[in-house]
Image: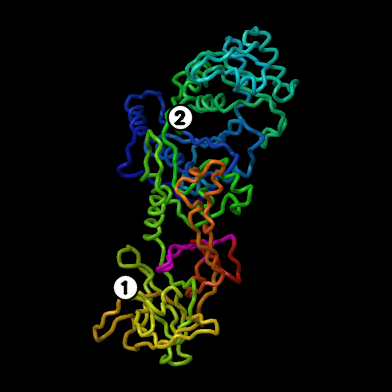
Amino acid sequence: MSDTPTPEPSASPRRDFIREMVADDVATGRFGRAPATRFPPEPNGFLHMGHAKSICLNFGIAQEFGGTCNLRFDDTNPATEDIRYVEAIQRDVQWLGFQWDGLYYASDYFEQLYDIAEMLVQKGKAYVDDQNEEQIRTNRGTVTSAGTPSPWRERTVAENLDLLRRMKVGEFPDGAKVLRAKIDMAHANMIMRDPLLLRIRHAHHYRRGNDWCIYPLYDFAHGLSDAIEGITRSLCTLEFKDAREIYDWLVREAGFENPPTQIEFARLELDYTVLSKRKLLRLVNEGHVTGWDDPRMPTIAGLRRRGVRPEAIRAFAEVIGVARKDARVEIATFEHAVRNDLNMEVPRRLCVLNPLKVVLTNYPEGQVEQLEAQDYPHDVPKTGSRTIPFSRELYVDRDDFMEEPPKKFYRLAPGREVRLRFGYLITCQEVVKNEAGEVIELRCTYDPATRSGNAPDGRKVQGTIHWVSAAHAADVEVRLYDRLFAQPDPDDVPEGRDFLSALNPQSLVVIPHAKAEPSVLDAPLGSRYQFERVGYFYAEPEDSTPEKRVFNR
């Protein structure tokens, strides 16, 4: 179990159209029971940001209205599901700060669902069809023309029961027969044109083993599982809107009193990202990323490994809210939530990504000072400090020097003076180059009267740069992660190409020998820092070794 505390309900909880409905349910006693929601993922992959939105919504409503929220695995497809996904999903939900009231599996309901199937057959509401998948799809018709009834649609109740029971004991091969609801082949909603309920699949199930061979379709299992658990509001994304009729039809025909109702909301569409599990699986299987938890992935596991805190994800879900219509969310909204969260929480450190040596020619050889450095800026309600070593030889970032600087370049250049963060004012006196003409060293002087960066004579220095002592620097690997895709909508590509052609070739840049102040080695793996003037970084627990610490941006 996670020891992450459950987030407290907001003092003034956000209101949206779903919460208004739930508030009305409570006020009127509509369901005769407390609000009950559920989060029902299929265990065929890792959870992503879209799931996080749903998790925050379902668990949040339960917390706000004194109800319950179940975690239920929709494990009705044995071909794609695995226990490792079940474990990953539980880990992610708990890491986000939530704890389910009940843990359930659709596969536990197979017997009940089968009994309901027999009941539907006995009521003349379902029949066994011998048509294959292609025939069923073709005969369903179009949005402008009615479907063609199956030649097996008028089988007798006795014949249908006999065939269904023989399906259950494994007498028929895959695809030989299916059980369909008997509704209306001319229905305006094509989903209601005798939808499939059970299909034959001789496959090993990760929980049920080989003892089951007729598996319920999603539309059959979903609403009935909600009803079995006493859910009040089934919260789904908009692509399930057309399925609401079969949801209601099934729970009504099954005889559930005061059954759950389905509400749809807009799914998350995030710039520079794909949130299709099928597409994420391609990224993993084809090696475009290192796995489901690659820090470039929009999965919860990937975000966790990148160093994002659960508080930031919950804050993001709060900001974007719940809407009735689809709309793309700018990635900057999420990035702002992450920065805003980390800014208040993480200490500052100095790290030079692209080191250029600086020699202070008038600083005493062999001398080392310990300079006081503040961990947090003045606008953060946290305090703390540490000391950082200062010596004759330093590293500064190569980007902070230009031999021929343009106007408004306030960093190092020949003859220019800059302020070292927490340190002294230094002036560049000489540029040392190698035989290829590349700058390899700067020789500077420091002003010993300017410790802490202030000149006693009041002279103004506009530029402040970061640095580390060369003799004391920690050699670290820094991974600069960027957006996985190079354009806001990865699917907006020329005809004949797919979303993979929009991948960003610079989504990961590895700097094997960055130089950081030595204190970064003192904190445990999993610590977060702001490397001043560079960004926020996470001490990677999985790839760090005793010899080298790895930091993910």
Residue 533 sits inside the magenta stretch = yes
> Seen in the image, is 496 located left or right of residue 333?
right
Amino acid type assigned to the residue bearing label 1 in the image: Lys
Where does the image place residue 56, in percent across and percent down from the top left? 43, 42
Where does the image place residue 277, in percent across and percent down from the top left? 55, 41
Image mark for residue 391: none
User: Depth check: 272 or 453 in front?
Assistant: 272
Where does the image place residue 500, in percent across and percent down from the top left? 56, 47
Image quadrant in which you'd find residue 513: bottom right
Q: Residue at x 50, y 77 (%)?
A: 473
The residue that label 2 is drawn on is 234
Q: Where is 520 relative to 92, above or below?
A: below
Q: Residue at x 49, y 76 (%)?
A: 355
The residue that label 1 is drawn on is 408
Find the magenta span and give its range: 524-542
Amino acid type assigned to the residue bearing label 2 in the image: Ser
Residue 128 sits inside the magenta stretch = no
Q: Residue at x 43, y 83 (%)?
A: 390
Total residue callouts: 2
Applied colour scheme: rainbow
> Seen in the image, is 249 located left or right of residue 117?
left
